[in-house]
Amino acid sequence: MDFTHLTAEMINTYSALEGAKTLEFLKQQSKHAMRENEALLMKILSDNKDTEIGRKYDFASIHSIEEYQKRLPITTYDDYVDYVLRDVQNDEQNLMTAYPIRIYCETSGSLGNPKIIPMSENTIQIHQKYNSGICDAVKDAALNPSWKKGRVMILTESKMTEMKKGKEYGSLSAIFMQQAKEVLPLISSTPVEAIFPSGDTDTRYLQARFGLAASDLVQISSSFISFAAEILRYIENHWCMIVEDIEKGTINSEIRMPDDVRERLMTKIIPMPERAAELRAIFEEGFDKPFATRVWKHLQLVSGVGTGAFEIYEKKIKERYVDERVQFYFSGLNSTEGLFSVPITMNDKTSAIIPHSMFYEFLPVDAHDDFSQIVTLDKVEVGRDYEIVMTNLNGLYRYRMRDCIRIMDKYNELPMIQFRYRLDQVADIIDDHTEEIAFTKTALDTASQLGLDLVDYSVYPDRDAALPRYIYFLELAGIPEGITRENIRAALHNNLEKYSPDIQTYREKGIGAPTELHILQPETYMLYQDLMVLKGRNPAQIKPVHIITNEFHYRFFSKLIEEKWEH
Amino acid sequence: MVINKNTVNGIMEFSIEGKLDTTTAPQLEAELNALPGDITAVVFDFQKLIYISSAGLRVLLKFYKKMNTLDGMKVIHVNESIMEVLDMTGFTDFLTVE
């Protein structure tokens, strides 16, 4: 197909129109959400009745939700490992699902080892229709129309590898990027060499360099908002080198990449002395004012996951890099297992569930695994927290996601949810069940109160100490003159007790100790990211280590403490 | 930090003296980026290295990824405290350390 006649405006206009249709369809579905969702379940059971799982539980004889709930147990990944292995290694078909499998995806694996999830073509279509489509419809409604003409700094890296029997393995985003490859140069400032990196390519440099050269940039797009914060910090620290490269039309010789990649990129680069002069003048003014909206005059949007553990990065971006002109599109609850929800308005951390994406069941978090309390979407209560149990189009049935969501509102019959925390990302020193969000707010409040430039944090529940306590590890890019480690520790301690009152109770009763603090060496979190990539993790899937739950992480962070702050 | 270099039969040895931290890591990185094309392997002698930080580890990691395509790299004469850092940060899982 010939794409040479297309422009960014044409592509974005088309996407926004299609997205608007999908959004309208979702709003219509919202009037009969339960009916639609039940119909989806019956279709999944009918379509999959001849799979091995379908025969095991006799899907053919299930005609109601109640029968389904009685017949099938609640499942976790362990219940599917054998099926996945048989599929991947022996090419056995029709085990979990009758729907054709397009790719095998790695999950983020916040805890433990990443898992392989087969991804059906049906699921991919749902993602494309509801996720990308509705996003562009919302952009069209909320942004200045100039958004359609500009380009996006895409911070996604897509890697696909071939497994046994020719099966493709990679991330869901890799599929979408692959499908859009021909038009990427029209809509993305990031070159394809950074979106589909080969060898040891410094993708961060390429994202920043080509992004800065693009004066028409309208959006920074990432899977997690943390990547947007990271690239802006990278620009802040390396602008001199990047601007020189833009001025001369070069790639600094110290930037690593395979020779053939460098050669290809050099064919795309021309000297841009005027743009370089503009950038240099802005950066030489310093970073007391947000630079992103000065460097990119048309910048209107930052998008990515920004809820839960990622709120820390949203705050950083707003405080340091952008002004009030820039809006945020926070991705809904979206994982390899499925597309759970999609935001239908800008700057909104609440998102609508999608009746045609999966069959939803909701287990109240305060039911403490009493599955008899599971309800369907028509019976959820606003203000209550639930764990989603889902039946999807990939062959997962009554699968526990271990994500805690809160029902914030209802759009007609459609629950509007907000991600709260990973259920396994809750820490205890005794029985406090302190959520990750509490640790995040503690770190953010402390940074704000003391004027700290917080890069990131991790918390270790130290249950082996004489009196149990939490130990914070903070990486700080800047500490104001006169602030001591004890000032920071005390602030963390006070804030944590505010967000997790049980901790105060333990201390007052003499069964818990005050919060401790270690300050990490500069570049520790970047080192962690680099190490995980070396170990084969997909960069787009690496989540921050906010709660230390294993020995490796504890040893890693413990060994990289900045000694000068310990005395 | 002082870096002494010595090349024998295509193997370059870097003897690093002092601290490899945020301030000095760029110096080592520049040396490694300027490696002659006929070098097939690199040895880091850490006998006089007294401290390595996250920034220093990142330089080693970046270079490891590059050298993995050639005959490789190794680290020798590592003292106990540096060894502990390499071990606890997972570097000994992939780095040859003697």
Image (cartoon, rainbow, N blue to C red):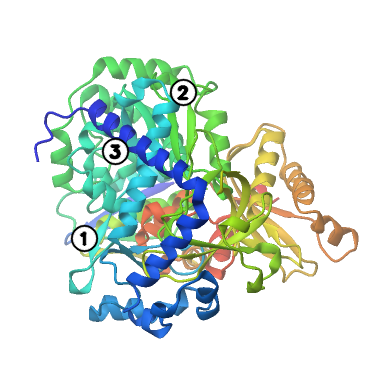
Q: Relative to A146, does residue A194 appear above or below in the rendering?
A: below
Is residue A566 something that shows in the picture?
yes
With A439 as the anchor, is B40 left or right in this view? left
- Which residue lies at the image location 38% right of the left edge and 22% below the top edge? A296
Q: Amino acid at mark 3?
A: Leu
Q: Relative to A114, does residue A278 appear above or below in the rendering?
A: above
**Separation (CA) of disc 3 from disc 2:** 19 Å
- Which residue lies at the image location 36% right of the left edge and 71% below the top edge? A46
Circle 3 chain? A
Is residue B28 something that shows in the picture?
no
Dot 2 corresponds to which residue? A291
Q: Relative to A42, does residue A305 appear above or below in the rendering?
A: above
| Residue reaching furthest to the left | A2
User: Few, some or many C-alpha atoms within 10 Å of disc 3 (few <14, some 14-19, many ≥20)?
Assistant: many
Dot 1 corresponds to which residue? B69
Q: Amino acid at mark 2?
A: Phe
Instruction: Pick whichever, B13 or B23, lies toward us.
Output: B23
Q: Amino acid at mark 1?
A: Thr
The label nearer to you, 1 versus 3, is: 3
Instruction: Pick whichever, B64 or A71, lies toward us.
Output: A71
Q: In terms of secondary structure, where does tag 3 sit? A: helix
Q: Position of residue A64 (x, y in %)?
A: 50, 71
Query: Which is nearer the N-term, disc 3 or disc 2?
Result: 3
Q: Quadrant of the C terminus of chain B?
A: bottom left
Circle 2 chain? A
Question: On the image, which quarter does residue A433 sit in?
Answer: bottom right
Residue A284 shows which numbered tag? none
The label nearer to you, 1 versus 2, is: 2
Q: Report whether mark 3 lies on the same chain as mark 2.
A: yes
Dot 3 corresponds to which residue? A206
